[in-house]
Image: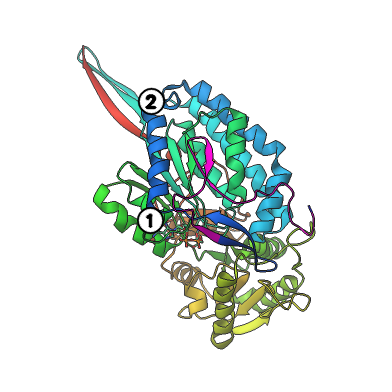
Amino acid sequence: MSNGKPDNMPDQIRHYINGEFVDSVDEDTFDVINPVTNETYIQASSGKVADIDAAVAAAKDAFDNGPWPHMLPRERSRILHNIADVVETRQQELAEMETWDSGLPISQTLGQARRAAENFRFFADLIVAQEDHAFKVPGRQINYVNRKPIGVAGLITPWNTPFMLESWKLGPALATGNTVVLKPAEFTPLSASLWPGIFEEAGLPAGVFNMVHGYGEEGYAGDSLVKHPDVPLISFTGESRTGQIIMANAAPYLKGLSMELGGKSPAVVFEDADLEKAIDATIFGVFSLNGERCTAGSRILVQRSIYDEFVERYAAQAANVKVGMPDDPKTEVGALVHPEHFDKVWSYVQIGKDEARLVAGGDRPEQFPDGNFLQPTVFADVAPDTRIFQEEIFGPVVAITPFDTDEEALELANNTTYGLAAYIWTNDLQRSHNFAQKVEAGMVWLNSNNVRDLRTPFGGVKASGLGQEGGYRSIDFYTEQQAVHINL
Ligand code: NAD
């Protein structure tokens, strides 16, 4: 690595179709920038309809004529474990590429690379333990469930923790015997360029994994994948608005859809909470991964009796969060992914200054006057009808709001269109469980940080998503369940 730039960079980021790296049919490319300098460091192939056609044809041929869907679960599982092994041995290289491309701190991209390996291991184990129902009507009938892979799965992913989020879709899609076309996010295509080598080394047959880079809009890779008639499944992670467009575009084909969308998750701190733990966790919950985290606890609701103390201590701790170069192991907040995204987050900081009381940050760090760096920013006294309370900012910016009663806390927690996660801090057992029941969120963490158990459902309610992934729910999404009836 020199100046943070990883060794072993490809000369261009290319599509990967039927076991070969290829350029776009029209040879078009787009610029990929480094978020520290905002300079273009590489070209990536820009996929359009023709490239998606080729990738889908390869995936369909591998599904219709190749060994992958018919292999024993144990055989597929072995290859998935190989993939996890290779990811683990290459974790440093992966983390360096991800940090270079996305601006995320290196200590955190290393954690994400390990989680990517774990995703493959988890689904490798799950698929061999898979059981299905059989029902008997004594003397008359036996009925059983025949589970089958569906075909070509279209996987569309965002730029935050790109490699890990790709693995969260690739693991179950491949474990269940589907073939895939992955469309990585255009801001961060670099780490995905390692997938082909990883899969080849692990022994995945050619054509099972295909990848087309490029933009999402009409005529480009993402849109063309959604509209391809030979792709019966789309698993999408991204913004809620994009999810709506994809659902509309997939409707004429009646595709299976998994939608993991945006969030504006509340962290509710009651007066009986362990304040130190709550502060540490809510700092981490919004400033880790540069705040570019779908489950960020970006609205902190605090009971009034501890409100002033909380705000003061929180602001002081936020001011101590270390902003730095993404490749510095001590850095806690790196550079936001792209100048377009920086401008969006920056505009919310200016809006927040009019809407609420700024208690920490609010500017670029002194040592980084240019580029996509931002001080961890904390607004207090944020009213529920303000934009910084309602809209997903997706950066290191948090809104703190006081409440008096449990009812008011619940009303505030549920007062957004989103419903991805919620975090509750209280030492009252009944209160915590009752609150969890009523809060409109797909996932709730009680007195705990955002630590995932891969067996549990992952997904949001309201504008945060449709359908759940995780454990057997992912297996359900990527398989057909056919009922077979036999008369005795
Ligand atoms: P985005 O919606 O802009 O883009 C996501 C992907 O969709 C990209 O690959 C993009 O090229 C593609 N795309 C865009 N328009 C498309 C179209 N019309 N058809 C097909 N594909 C299209 O999202 P983003 O800015 O990359 O990611 C940030 C968002 O993702 C945030 O809202 C965040 O909360 C959300 N997110 C959700 C989860 C979750 O699990 N719920 C996880 C991570 C991120």
How far separated are the C-alphas under marks 2 and 1?
27 Å
Identify residue for label 1.
Answer: 223
- Figure label count: 2
**Which SS class for mark 2?**
helix
Residue drawn at 35 percent across, 34 percent down? 150
Identity, as a three-letter code, of the amino acid under mark 2: Asn
Closest to the observer, 383 or 81:
81
In the picture, measured across the screen, residue 323 lies left or right of residue 450, that is right
Q: Can residue 33 be found in the magenta stretch?
A: no
Q: Can residue 22 be found in the magenta stretch?
A: yes
Residue drawn at 57 percent across, 43 percent down? 453
Q: Is residue 487 above or below residue 420?
A: above
**Residue 94 visible here:** yes
Q: Which segment did they paint magenta? A: 2-30
Identity, as a three-letter code, of the amino acid under mark 1: Asp
- Residue 243 at x, y = what percent? 39, 59
- Residue 480 at x, y = what percent? 33, 33
Closest to the observer, 349 or 202:
202
Closest to the observer, 479 or 134:
479
**Which SS class for mark 1?**
helix
Most distant residue in the front direction? 26
Residue drawn at 48 percent across, 34 percent down? 174
**Residue 429 visible here:** no
Identify residue for label 2.
Answer: 65
- Residue 407 at x, y = what percent? 46, 69
Most distant residue in the bottom direction? 354
Q: Main secondary structure of the magenta part?
A: loop
Contact, mark 2 vs mark 1 (Cβ under 8 Å): no
Res 295 → quadrant: bottom right
